[in-house]
Image (cartoon, rainbow, N blue to C red):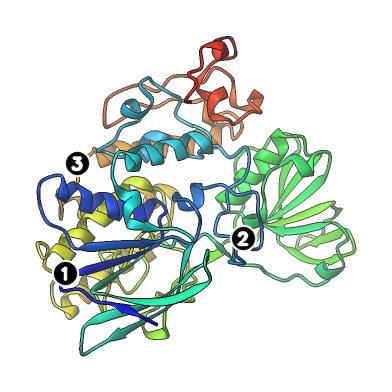
Amino acid sequence: MNKKRTNKKRVGIIGAGPSGLAQLRAFEALQNKGEEVPEIVCFEKQSNWGGMWNYTWRTGVGKYGEPIHGSMYKYLWSNGPKECLEFSDYSFDEHFKKPISSYPPRPVLFDYIQGRIKKSKAREYIRFDTTARWVSYDEKTKKFTLVLDDLKIDKTYSEEFDYLIVASGHFSTPNMPYFKGIENFPGTVIHAHDFRGADQFKDQNLLLIGSSYSAEDIGVQCHKHGAKSVTLSYRSNPIGVAWPEGIKELPLVTHFENDTAYFKDGTTEKFDAVIMCTGYQHKFPFLPDELRLKTKNNLYPDHLYKGIFFNKLPQLIYLGMQDQYYTFNMFDAQAWVARDFMMGTYKLPEENERRLDMDKWLERNDKLETSFDHVDFQSDYIKDLLALSDYPDFNVDTVGEMFKSWLKDKEENILTYRDKTYKSVVTGTMAAEHHTDWMDELDDSKERYLYEPEEEEAIPENI
């Protein structure tokens, strides 16, 4: 294996999803000011950027036998207002040249993500179809050795880096529970990770196990696209919104007998299919034990100073590892702080001081009770990050209030909250109402979304 060496500082980024792209964009912002930046290489195991937003019809393994990363599916629409995730240096107005609704479908959001990065030379820094196999750190040289596989040509090689950024996400390795008797269930049993659309579940009685956002959204999508009934089974607390006829919640399944599920409250019911909406594991098979972040999904993982720097070795940087209300703009805020550390303009305090700061956040995290508490916590975290870098400021408090309105909208009506509109904190633009009510909109294509049916003849050829 050959190790590439250079005198210039080198930064390795694992993953070209929203977090990895945010890091590339952060360095580019410095280059645009005429500053010299380190040598940067980003490794992406898929054939295109976008991470989760890069939809694939595949499940299980991909073209080169690697585990499929994406959990996206047909008919997925944003489940939070786009105004809460807007890049503060690249607005929706700038990209689409007109107001759009607050809840776009996946292809539209993917187009927006790509819009900012396509303006740059970021693609030159990304090696696609390349997966990280192993990482080691040399205490003497203070460098990481990253072992990689070029999947296209089936070649293994290694390179050295001064800083390593883990931006591989944590919503791709399913947490798959076992229930007694499920091995004899005669219908479909899948995890939400492998759900690719509601079409196959039309006219079926569907059981979703879990009370997370994925259970909520997949349940509503299947109801919208013709499932006969949807039952959501919760472990501790129900989602608790006012479900329409055809959707209900029951306590946790205890066991299965053929196609019959038995629930804790004594209820029994027959089902055609089961979808496990039971969350994901933080999984980093390329990292040795001493460098691996070990955490459950929460708003403030332990061992990460400012939610970014691995406390025992701050040159190891994790992006986007939190449970998320904020997404794209939070990844940006993290990437800008990480960049300044790597550039030497942001100095970290000593390890014991970092530990005290983390403990303060962890203690507060443990006391959170309501969804509003969670929003306020992550809002304060974002403000803490924004105070540390020159990332273009945005009104975090207003975004936090939008999140709270969104939570209320869902409680009011889980089927119509996506018809609501919000105002951008970046441009002040009020979102447009979509031309079709969400429950009646069965086409999630970008063309259909951006142009009303009578406008179709006017669609630009390059759309």
**Taking the image as drawn, is residue 380 in sight?**
no
When asked about the image quadrant of residue 13, the answer is bottom left
Q: Which residue is mark 2?
A: 62
Kind of residue at disc 2: Gly
- Label 1 sits on a secondary structure element that is loop
- The local crowd at label 2, few if under 14, some if 14 to 19, many if 20 or more residues have their Cα within 10 Å, is some
Residue placed under numbered mark 3 in the picture: 393
Q: Which is more toward the observer, 90 or 370?
A: 90
Q: CA distance from mark 1 to mark 3?
A: 31 Å
- Give the foreground label among 2 and 3: 2
Whether label 2 touches label 1, CB < 8 Å: no
Above or below: residue 125 compared with residue 402: below
Pointer 1: what residue? Answer: 8
Q: What amino acid is labelled 3 in the image?
A: Asp
Give the vertical position of 380 relative to 399 (above or below).
below
Q: How many marks?
A: 3
Residue 436 drawn at (x, y percent): 58, 19
Per the image, label 3 sits on a secondary structure element best described as loop
Expressed as whole percent of the image width and height from the top left, the position of residue 9 reads 18, 70
In the depicted structure, whether residue 364 falls above or below residue 141: above
